[in-house]
Amino acid sequence: MRPTLLGVRARIWVAVLHVSDRVREKITNRHGIEEQELRDEVECIPGLRATWDDSPDRGRRAIVEIRLRRQRVLVVLYPTGIDPDEFHLGSAYPVHD
């Protein structure tokens, strides 16, 4: 693992991704991202790379970069604390190059 500006890069396994109604509405209405297409790129993907960030305000989170429809998207995942492979979706942000 190597340090980055945010934290430590690592490979993670997302076996279960929890998406609240509020987050689902936000990513769909604000960013045009459908829950299922995001799940297809994050859930049960071997070798998914994440950068861990420990925020004093938001706690520990993993930032994952994926590609949706040829566009980079940053996905914010919060560990559930129940199982190391189980996460809550915080948000997903398209990156406009």
Image (spheres, rainbow, N blue to C red):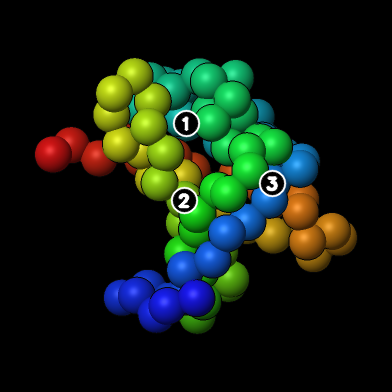
Q: Amino acid at mark 1?
A: Lys
How busy is the neighbourhood of tag 3: few (under 14 within 10 Å), some, or many (20 plus)?
A: many
Q: In the rendered image, which residue does mark 1 sit on?
A: 26
How busy is the neighbourhood of tag 2: few (under 14 within 10 Å), some, or many (20 plus)?
A: many
Q: Secondary structure at mark 3?
A: loop
Query: Which quarter of the image is occupied by the C terminus?
Result: top left
Is 29 located above or below residue 54 in the figure?
above
* Residue 55, horizontal then vertical, whole percent: 48, 75
Identify which residue is drawn at 55% across, 48% down: 48
Identify which residue is drawn at 42% across, 78% down: 2
Q: Are marks 1 and 3 in contact (CB under 8 Å)?
A: no
State the CA–CA distance, disc 1 to disc 3.
21 Å
Q: Amino acid at mark 3?
A: Val
State the CA–CA distance, disc 2 to disc 3.
11 Å
Which residue is nearer to you in this view: 80 or 38?
A: 38
Q: Is residue 55 visible?
A: no
Identify which residue is drawn at 58% across, 49% down: 47
Which residue is nearer to you in this view: 80 or 85?
A: 85
Q: In the rendered image, which residue does mark 2 sit on?
A: 64
The disc placed on residue 14 is 3
Q: Please indicate whether residue 39 sits to the left or right of residue 95 in the image.
A: right
* Residue 24, horizontal then vertical, whole percent: 57, 28
Q: Amino acid at mark 2?
A: Val
* Residue 81, horizontal then vertical, whole percent: 79, 64
Q: Is residue 11 visible?
A: yes
Q: Residue furthest left?
A: 97
